[in-house]
Image: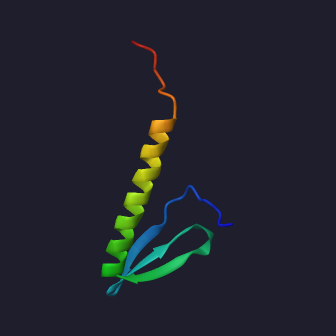
Amino acid sequence: MPITYDEASSVSRVGRSIKMEGPGGVEVKLTAKAALKTAGRLDEAALDVLIEGAETEPLKRGKSA
């Protein structure tokens, strides 16, 4: 089963490609079109998880000043 990391990947331009390096030694080179499509998919999936978590976690109330 894959490990879940709480560390963002680094992204850089290498010529006409996009290079993504992540935790655990992950390294991927993508075309610009593939990188944009991947970024959109990551954004959508991450938002789904955050929204789902917000809906299931109890509301935390802070102290009034």
Quadrant location of residue 25?
Answer: bottom right
Q: Picture coordinates of residue 56 (x, y %)? A: 50, 37
Does 28 sit above or below residue 38? Answer: below
Q: Is residue 33 left or right of residue 56?
A: left
Quadrant where the C terminus sits is top left
Question: Is 9 in front, or is 47?
Answer: 47
Q: Is residue 33 left or right of residue 45?
A: left
Residue placed at 42% from the left, 52% from the top? 48
Q: Quick one: which residue is furthest to the right in this view?
A: 1
Residue placed at 59% from the left, 59% from the top? 5
Residue placed at 46% from the left, 68% from the top? 10
Quadrant location of residue 44?
Answer: bottom left
Q: Picture coordinates of residue 54 (x, y %)? A: 45, 38
Q: Is residue 5 left or right of residue 37?
A: right
Question: Is 23 in front, or is 43?
Answer: 43
Does 6 sit above or below residue 19? Answer: above
Q: Picture coordinates of residue 38 (x, y %)? A: 39, 71
Q: Quick one: which residue is furthest to the bottom in this view?
A: 15
Question: Is 5 in front, or is 13?
Answer: 5
Does 12 sit above or below residue 2? Answer: below
Residue placed at 39% from the left, 66% from the top? 41
Quadrant where the N terminus sits is bottom right
Which of the colour schemes (rainbow, by chain, secondary structure, one colour) is used? Answer: rainbow
Instruction: Report the label total.
Output: 0
